[in-house]
Each structure stands twice: as structure tokens, then as C-alpha cells.
Amino acid sequence: MDAALPLRDTRTADIGACHHCGETLASDAIRDGDRSFCCNGCAAASTWIREAALGDYYALRTSPAGRVQVDASDFGAWDRDVVLAEHARVVPGGREITVLTDAMRCAACAWLIDRALRRHPGVLDAGANAVTGRVVVAWDPQRVALSTLMQRLAALGYRPWLATGDAREQAQRRERRRWLLRLGVAGLGAIQAMMFAEALYLDTAQQMPVATRDFFRWITFLVSTPVVFYSGWPFLEGMWRELRGRRVGMDTLIAGSTLLAYVASLVETLRGGAHVWYDAAVMFVLLLLVARMFEQRARGIASAQVDALARARPALALRERKDGSTEQVPLGEIAIGDVLRVAAGEAVPADGVLLDRAASFDEALITGESTPVRREAGDAALAGSVCREHAARLRVVRTGADTRLSQLTRLVEQAQSARPRLARAAERVAGGFVVALLLCAVATFAWWHVHEPARALEVTLALLVVSCPCALSLAIPTALTTAHGALARIGVLGVREDALSTLARVDRVVLDKTGTLSNGRPELDSVATFGNLDAIDALSIASALERGSAHPLAQAFAHIAAARAAHGVQAVAGCGIEGDIEGVRWRLGRADFAARQADDGALWLGDGTRAFARITVRETMRYGAREAVAALREAGIAVELCSGDATEAVASFARQVGIDDVLARQSPEQKLARVREAQARGDVVAMVGDGINDAPVLAGANVSLAMAEGAALAQRAADLVVTSPSLLRVPQAIAVARRTQRIIRQNLAWALGYNVLAIPLAATGHVTPWIAALGMAGSSLLVTLNALRLSRGQRNERRAA
């Protein structure tokens, strides 16, 4: 700041509010006449505002500004070419960039930002939107650096952030504007066309002069042309694609009906015929555009999770140098092993391990949990989660496409682009229906042409329009897309195409224990040694064997430094793990595997014949486990626990959650046999697990759900992945699947019933073309709005949970 700052008053003062940001003042507040400030940053911002003659800001604002963090104004990385190339656009005279700020709370904030930036030399234009929190700045890089402008924003209390996913947002906004413009043209054209058509319809006595009639027809033709060829272009383009692919579908029927009404009307206008149908053509386009926009709205709501995940990671990260200082770097420059600092309120840029002290992270986008999760030093911090309370330091372990956030984004996109068998079947039925409808239209035209030629074209047009199978084609895809979006918001991702339809029919759920009913974070309980081996050596050997293992029990030894190295490590499914350490072959696992002793549920360390240590671990119940079991039972679903752990530990967990059907010490083959046995009785079985031993049974069950923190192999074998730490998401996912099937049945019943009723009415001449357009569009809107109920119902259920 160029201006002198007021000095901090260390005398005891009455508690008040900061003149700039409104925060409560401490006893050592900064005084400047009758104004008080909480920090030097706010005092500097106020001084600059006053000297720039922008003091009206304080009179106009309805909310206080954000607190100025003067130590958070290092924006040097924003001037790098890699950042500008990705986030800035070339405009005449310089560049333009869109940044975000969460401190802009009212119109006065936007007013201040506009004037503060525009007064800076080198700024071409600036605009702030208090509603969206976006600031658009155009500047000349030859006269002023972007970092200087961002420092000015930060010094005023409006900490800027790069708008990640900006290209995606820009493309979506352009597409929305295009559709709104098409809808506006169609609306205006339809109003005008209906007005002129009404004048023609009211001439029931045929007394209108021919010149006047032709005038109304030609003016209606001029009004209808942009509606048909501009507003209706998406349907014309779709018809062209379908015809090039040598198939007929909805767009062929829509565009064909529109062109038929338009061209037939033009021919009748030229030859002075009795009827024209311009009004039907424009109404058809208008109503279909409305229905299509509602469909896109449904898909937008469902894909909101993808958009949110795309914006979750920041564009820049604060990396520590070797000397302890920091630098801002683009995400592409982050490497594994780097130490990053994440300020409170910022998103984590990469997957890492928390250093120094505990911190809380909001993982709502990743897991669906609205409550921040507390992580201790050594715990994982996921990219896209938001740091709360205080700043955190972490060491990077995964970057870019390898982060959990990137993997979840791919899963969500995969789930929403999947086309289940039921949807493919509906598309085939709709395609066959179009062919049958065209044949029916030809027969209808022929009959009317023989008996009443004047109405043949009108009746045929009404038949084509009213029976367009839009509702039938939308009935299943819209419901499935909305359902996948609802599941993604609670932390359940569909991986297989037909997972939802099978999940809706589940009547038995088989649960694993470790990592499923338990939270997957076991802790050491006791260590007893035998012979010359002491407890420290026993744990060191166990840690060396478990290093790199994906089994949940391996986490119990993660904090132990392994001075030894294990070679030739092999996991024996259902028994334990073995490997060579300093020339000795060690085994860790069940007593009968490690030391040829009776199994007692503990972990034993041995060489295959002798026992050297007995290790016990304790596990904590997973959040929502008891409530999840109760919810499954209330839904009429049988629940059983099938685990490879010892009988006593499994029985204890079963008692705590209320499961009566329990099997312990089950190998992967035995678990699979148990599922096959239930399937042979006619049960539809859902398996919930997370460990590598669960992969065979996950693949063998009718439908399977894998916990996201489990083994990658288990997730690849599963139909759905539960990213939330709460087991309650399992019964909630089943409830969503069942609601989805009900809505699909309702949509199909309506679509089929509508066509069964509408086709005879249209073929017998009881429906005019414009009424047919209204009925068809209304039918499509109905199935779309019915599918959107899935999203509303899931939001209510999530709040209740």
C-alpha cells in the first residue's frame, strides 16, 4: 500500500466490529479516528478505498466485505504461460480471464470491484457479478501483469480463485444460450402464426377476399420459416444423422412431420388450396423444444455431480520449497513427494498424506457425506476435499488421473453414459414403432384420400404428430440418468450397465465384516511372543510382510517402521501372508496357517510349524452399520454376515448390528458357494464387501457393492462402488433402485397408454394437428417430470440421513 497505515492501538478497547469486514474486534484493534479494524489488511483496504474516492461503497453495501488476508496475495504463478493458456482468452488488445471470489456478498461489492480494477492502468474492462461470484477482467499484458490485478482484488478483501473447469462451463453456457434463442424465436413465431391462422379459421363462411386470404398465408409463411429451419434445426440435423445411418427414429418422425406440414402449406399457398397448416408446424417445433429442454434439464441435474467434480480441484497449489518458503504452481507441475500447504477453505489439489497435525476435511463431493471428516497425521487427504478449521500440510502420493477424484469422475461419467439392456430394448421398440406408424400413416392417407380428399393430409399429419414415440423413448433413459445422478450425490456409483435393475430385485444381502461392517481401520490390541523373539522384532517382521498389502488388517501395522525388507511375499487367500525376511520364511495369519495350532481368531506369526508371536487387533464398527441392517430388514431383505475372520469376532459384530445368520472362517470359495446356494433357492443376492478376498463372490453375486476404500480388484469386480463411509448408503441405493423401477413402469404405462388412445382418435379425424402437437409434447413432459421426482426424493432422504 502506498498510503500510510494507522497504527495498532494496544490499549484495551470495547469489543465492536471491523469497519471493513464486520468481524468482531479484539482488544488490540487498529484505530483510525472513529473507525476500527481487525487487521492491517482491512485497514489498508479501507485507506485505499477512501483515497481512491470510492468511499460510497460503505454507504451502498448491504453486507460487510471479506476479511483481507495480506499474507495470501502471492499470485506470481498466475503470470505463467501454462496458466494463461488454460484459463485466459485472447481478446482485442489483450487477454480476458474469469475468476471466482466467495467474499462478494452484495451489489456494492461488485460496484467496488468494477471501479477498483477499471482505474488500474492496463485494464481494458472489468465486470463483477455479485450473484455468481464471478469477476471478468480484460487487461493488456504488455502494461500490467495479471498477478498485480489479483493482488489488488485480494487487498480489497476479495480473494480470487481461478475458475477451474471454465472451458466446460463456457461451452455449457453457450449451448444454453443457443437453446434459449431457438426457444425465443419459436415462441414469437408461434404466437404470430397462431394469430394469423386464427383469422383464417374464423372465416367459416368463406367470405374473406382471396387477396386478403393469400396475404395472411404468405405472412404466416414468412413467420414460420425461421421457426422451422432455425428453431427446428436440432430435429432436422438429427433426422439427417438417422438417415445417413440408414435408420429411422424420433428425429426423423419429428422433422418429417414438421417439414410435411410446412411444405404442404407452401404448396397449398401457391396453388390457392383450401387449407394450410403453418400453425401446426410452428406449434410442433415450439412444444418439442420445450419438452427437449426439460429433458436436458433432467440430464443436467443428473450430471451435476460430474460438473461439481470437474470444478473440485483448484487450478493452483501452494508448494513448499526446500528452504521452507512457498511457491504457487499449476497442478501439472505437482509431483509425488511434494509437500503442499492447503489453507482453510481451500480444496486439496492432489491425494496426499497429512503431516504435522490433525485437520478436518469436507469430503461431500467425493463421499456424499455432509459432515466434515477429521483426519489425523498420517491419514489420507483426498483431492477435491475442502480443508476446514485451519491450514494443513500434506505430502503428495497421487496426482492427476491417479487421484481418487479423477477416478470417481470417470466412474460417474461411465455410469451416466451406460445404456442398460432395458433402455436398448425400449429404443428398439421405439424404432419398430416408427416404422409401423409410417405404414399406418400411409394407409390412413389412402383411406381418407378416397373418402374425403380435403382432409387426407390434415388427418395424416395429426396421426404422425400425436403418435410420435418421444415419451416411449424418454421413459427409461431419463429415469436411469436421473437415478444415477441421485446415487452419485449420496456416494454410490454404478459401474455396470444393468446394476440398478438388478439391485431393485434384491431380497438377500450378504455382508463381509472387515472393511464393510467395520470401518477398515483396525488397531493393534496386544502382542504376546514366544522363544527368543521380542515384541518389537515381531511387529517389525509383521510390518515388513504387510507392507504394500491391500488387506484392511495391514493398516494395523502401517505406523510401525519396518527395518527389515520382505522378499517373495505371497498372500494366501483366507489364510494369511508369507514371505522371506533375512533368509527365514515367515508366515502371518491364522494359527493353523502360521504355526499349525488350533485357530483362535488371533493373528499368529510363525514359520509354518512353530509360533513366535500372537497378535490381536481390534476393529471399530462402521458408521451407520446398525441402522443399515435395520433399514434392510424393514425393506423386507434378509441379511447375513459371511466373513473369513474368527468365529468369536464375527459373532460379536453380528450381535452388535443385529444379524442372526452368521458364517465365520469362510474362504473365498466357501463365500461363493454360499451365494450360489442362495441363488439356487431363488434369492436375488447382493454382496457387499471390500477386500481382495471378496472379488470372486462380488463377481458371482447377482449384484455387488464394493466399499471405495477397499481393494481395487474388489471394485473392478463390483457392480456399484460405495464412496461414502456410511453403510446406510446400501439400503438407500436399493430404495433408489426400487423407486426407479416404479417410475420406469409408470412412464412406460403412460407412454403406451397414450399412444393406444391417441392413434385411433387421430386416424378417425378427431384430432387437429395443433392439438396433436400439444398432446405429444405434454406426454413427453410428463415422463420427464415424473423421472425428476427421483432427484427430489433422494434429496429428502439424504437430509433425513
Image (spheres, rainbow, N blue to C red):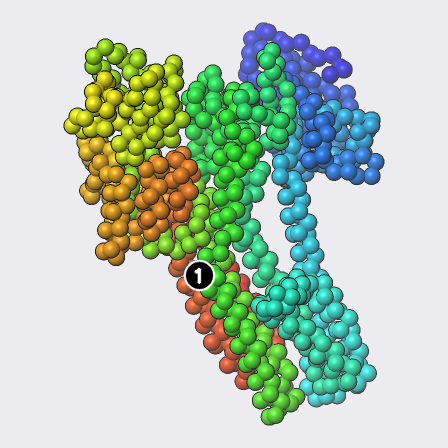
SS at badge 1 = helix
Callout 1 amino acid: Leu
Quadrant of image for the C terminus: top left
Residue name at image x 48 percent, y 37 percent: 366
Residue found 37% across the figure and 21% down from its top: 566
When asked about the image quadrant of residue 456, the answer is bottom right
For residue 34, which quarter of the picture? Answer: top right
Relative horizontal placement of residue 360, taking residue 233 as reference (left or right)? left
Position of residue 526 relative to residue 307, above or below, is: above
| Residue 248 percent across, percent down from the top left | 59, 70
How many neighbours does mark 1 have within 10 angstroms: few (below 14), some (14-19), or many (20 or more)?
Answer: some
Q: Is residue 258 left or right of residue 478?
A: right
- The extreme left residue here reads 598
List x then y, in percent, for residue 601: 21, 28
Note whether residue 721 is visible. no
**Residue at 82% across / 83% down in the picture?**
211
288 lies left or right of 698? right
Q: Residue 83 lies in what quarter of the image?
A: top right
The answer to whether any part of residue 716 appears in the image is yes
Where is the N terminus found, in terms of image quarters?
top right
Q: Residue at x 37, y 44 (%)?
A: 705
**Residue 582 percent location from the top left of the image:** 34, 16
From this viewpoint, which residue is outermost toward the bottom? 451
Counting every numbered tag in the picture gives 1
Q: Is residue 625 left or right of residue 151?
A: left
Q: Residue 546 placed where, x, y %? A: 35, 24
Q: Which residue is mark 1?
A: 422
Nearer to us in this view, 139 or 601: 601
